[in-house]
Every structure is written in structure tokens, then in C-alpha cells.
Image (cartoon, grey):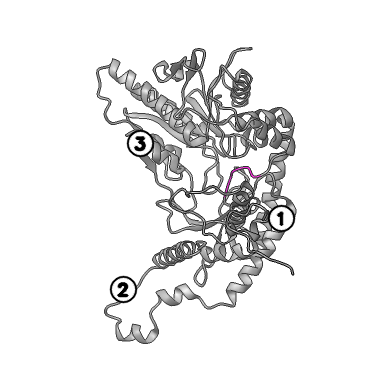
Amino acid sequence: MVLSKTASQTDASVHSTFASRYAQASLPRFKIPENSIPKEAAYQIINDELMLDGNPRLNLASFVTTWMEPECDKLIIASINKNYVDMDEYPVTTELQNRCVNMIAHLFHAPLEEGETAIGVGTVGSSEAIMLAGLAFKRKWQNKRKALGKPIDKPNIVTGANVQVCWEKFARYFEVELKEVKLREGYYVMDPAKAVEMVDENTICVAAILGSTLNGEFEDVKLLNDLLTQKNKQTGWDTPIHVDAASGGFVAPFLYPELVWDFKLPLVKSINVSGHKYGLVYAGIGWCIWRSKDDLPDDLIFHINYLGTDQPTFTLNFSKGSSQVIAQYYQLIRLGFEGYKNVMENCRENAMVLKEGLEKTGCFSIVSKDEGVPLVAFSLKDNSSHTEFEISEHIRRFGWIVPAYTMPPDAQNITVLRVVIREDFSRTLAERLVGDIQKVLHELNTLPARVTAKLSTSEEDAAANYKKIVKKTEVEMQREIAEAWKKFVLLRKKTRGVC
């Protein structure tokens, strides 16, 4: 007679995760569980849930690198347990960071003598780099004002309304007024003339963007430098410039070497760049480079010795991984100037393929510029029936993540879609995306205009209530449509949670 038994909850002989009790248990969401589980089960259930994330390679909303060579992946894994801040214990890693700073500083034409060490620091991204640069400007401005016996309670920064949110964070966290130059339809970057008009004696710097997040366009840093130089001479001030080159810093030197935007301009005192964007490194690395030692106040630099030796540090955080620093050095020596140029040229060419494909549909207006970060920003020529938010929502069915958003003030009536062209976005994918967008357009054209139907009043109701109805302009209608679809998309996202 054959005897059978039911495996107990602690029966270790059942090796399959899906044959165990762990496949039936709900995952903890609020409290750490009382008991341990096998490593295989922990891996399997977490890996299974992560399958519901989007594919990073098809996330066309992000500037952040999503592919690196396997050899670099090996270096990253091998150094994942090194704490970057332990400079005495990991001197080679520190040396690699210094080499990266020197290479990037020379790329940006820092005025360095032969063999002179550049002034800069690795950060977790451009957000931290901007915080550090802003603090340096604020402290220099404060020190000068104190020496003159003037108040230091109302510092401000002048930027365009197109700046990334990290500038707003800096202004709020460190109590600096953010004076924004408003945009206008057809002109989606900071106007240098208007920016200089807003400069006063309390302006710690003017921030120019090399590669706007909204449409990839480069702001005219040279014109800003020239106009600000004139104002400084007239007023006796010495208001400097910071260049936020998070997206464009690893693009302009290779695609537009004649463009003057960096330390060639005397008023540019610091530049930040994201290594994890077109520096071609996975997320978690940025750089801040100063023109000279005089532009980074000594009283912002801390010296510690409890890790072995005297170590200067100027960061917002302390511990962080070494992997991304090592990966950045790998890319710089692996690709060299030639390799980076080839990658950027490929990105630009694939952006043109996408742009031309969208133009051939006859449905879109291109908002981005040919000279700038390799991306394509575009709007519907006619969104009276369906909107950019609908296209963004429907294209996800094919796996693509393409964001739709409204422009900042005073161009908020303009809604755009944006596709960022990264290293791993090939011509084949560009052509495939155009085809999928055409399918979405065809499908939407067969559907009723749901939004406008909700926003419009029937002819019968209008006739009965004509005295109560205020006729809206076309711009007001487009704003209402955009707002309605933003709410709709947000509601869809909120209801997609895994139970």
C-alpha cells in the first residue's frame, strides 16, 4: 500500500517556489515579516513582480542610459561593494574620479595649465551638482556683500521657466528667490535679453540650459555672456553664469564643436553635466566642474580624517557606491572622442529619421530644433478631436512609453509629446515607432471625440441656456481638453496597482 503525505509548511524538501506556500502568501507591504524565507523564493517572487515594470529600453521619456557593454557591467558588479567616500581604503577609485574630472574639465575648455588639476566633484546626478554649484554662488555672493557691509537676506537666481525641477528645489531648500523668464509660444527657452533685464545686485548667478528638458534646445549662452558683461560694466556688479549642461554637456562638444557655450566664455564659472545621460553611464552619476579654485569657496569644503587620512569633501551626501565613477572612466577611455562622436552622430541621425517619419503623417508639428539634444518633441496640428495625452496613453499598448505634457508659463496652452533618442535606440526602432504611432492615429480617428463631447454642451442645451453660457476661445478649450486628459491619465495610473 502506497502512503502519501502533505508537505508541511516547513518541509524543506519542496524546492520549487511555485510548489511551496510562498506562492500563496501575500507579500508584506507595511511591516517586516516575522519569519525568513528561502533565498530562491525571495528572488522569484520579487523578480515576478518586477516583470510588471515597463521595459527601460522602450522608456522614451527618459534621458538616462539603459544599456552598457557587458565588460562595463562586470566592472560595475565587481565594485558594487566599494564605498566611494573611503578614499584612503580605495585610492585607485579616487584617482579614477579625479581623472574623470580632469577629462571633463578639458572637454569644457577649463583654463588649465599643462598638468594642472581641475576643480570638480562627482555627484549622484545633476541635481546634487546643481545644489553644490548654487551653494558656491550663494556663499561667494554673501562673502562679497558682507565685506561691503550690505544685506545678504534676499539672494536670487535668474533662470528660464523651462528649467528642471532641481532648480526649484535648490531655491526652496536654500532660501533663494527663483526669478523665471516666462516662455512664449514658438520660443520655449530662456530669452537672454529678458534674463539680463531681471538681474539685480542680489542675483547670485544666471543659469543657462544647454539642452532644455522640454524640447532639447540649447540656450544662447554666448549672447547671455555678452549682454551680462555689458550690464556688469554699467553697474559695477560681477554677476556670473552657471551652465546646466545635464543633457547637452556630452552632446555639444562632439556634434557642435564650433558652438561657444562653456568655459571659453569668461562669465561661465561652473558647469554641471549628467554622466548617466549622454555620458552613457547607468543612473547615479553626475559632475560639477568649476572654472578655477577661486570659484569654489574654501569654507564650503569639509576635511575629515576618521577614515584614515585627511580627506576634503564637498557633497550633500556622504556614502555612495563607486560603480558609476568606474563606469564613467571606462566609457571615457573605451570610446574616446571618436567613439562619443560616433554615438552622438547616430543619435542625431535616428532623431532625424523619426522626425521625418512623423512629418510624413501630416498630423504633427515638430517643436524641437535640429540643433540640440537628440530628441523629437511634437504636437498634433489638430487636437480638437483627440489629444496628445490620448496618443501617449494608447501607444503604451505597443510597449512604448512616450510622455505628453504641457509647456510652462506663458506657453501652457501648448501640449507636446517627446521622444528621447538614446544610444540604444536604433533606426529600426525609430521606424517601428512611427508605424505604431500611425496605427494609434488610425484607431483614434475611428473613435468619437470623447473629451470634446464631455466638454461641449449639446445644441439643445445651448439654445435653452444661451444666456448662462460664456463662449470660450479656442485656447481655453484646448487648455480644458489638456487638463481633462491629464486627470484621466493620472486616474488610470492610480487604478493600475497590483493587488
Q: Is residue 198 visible?
A: no
In which quarter of the view is residue 167 placed?
top left
Circle 1: residue type = Leu
Q: Quadrant of the N terminus?
A: bottom right
Location of residue 483 in the rendering, given as x and y in whole percent from the top left corner: 42, 63
Location of residue 214 in the rendering, given as x and y in whole percent from the top left corner: 51, 48
Rounded to the nearest angstrom, the CA distance separating label 2 from label 3 is 43 Å
Tell me the SS state at disc 2: loop
Circle 2: residue type = Val
Nearest to N terminus: mark 1 or mark 2:
1
Indicate which label's residue lies in the foreground, 1 or 3.
3
Query: In the rendered view, does 469 fall on the left or right side of 250?
Result: left
**Residue depicted at 46% across the width and 48% down the height:** 32
Q: Was residue 64 drawn as part of the magenta stretch in this picture? A: yes
**Residue depicted at 48% across the width and 44% down the height:** 189
In which quarter of the view is residue 83 placed?
top right
Check the image and report above or below for 264 versus 187.
above
Nearest to N terminus: mark 2 or mark 3:
3
- Residue range corresponding to the magenta coloring: 62-66
Q: Nearer the viewer, residue 266 or 294?
A: 294
Location of residue 298 in the rendering, given as x and y in whole percent from the top left corner: 42, 16
Name the residue carrying label 1: 429
Indicate which label's residue lies in the foreground, 2 or 3.
3
**Residue depicted at 28% across the width and 18% down the height:** 146
Name the residue carrying label 2: 470
Residue 173's disc number: 3
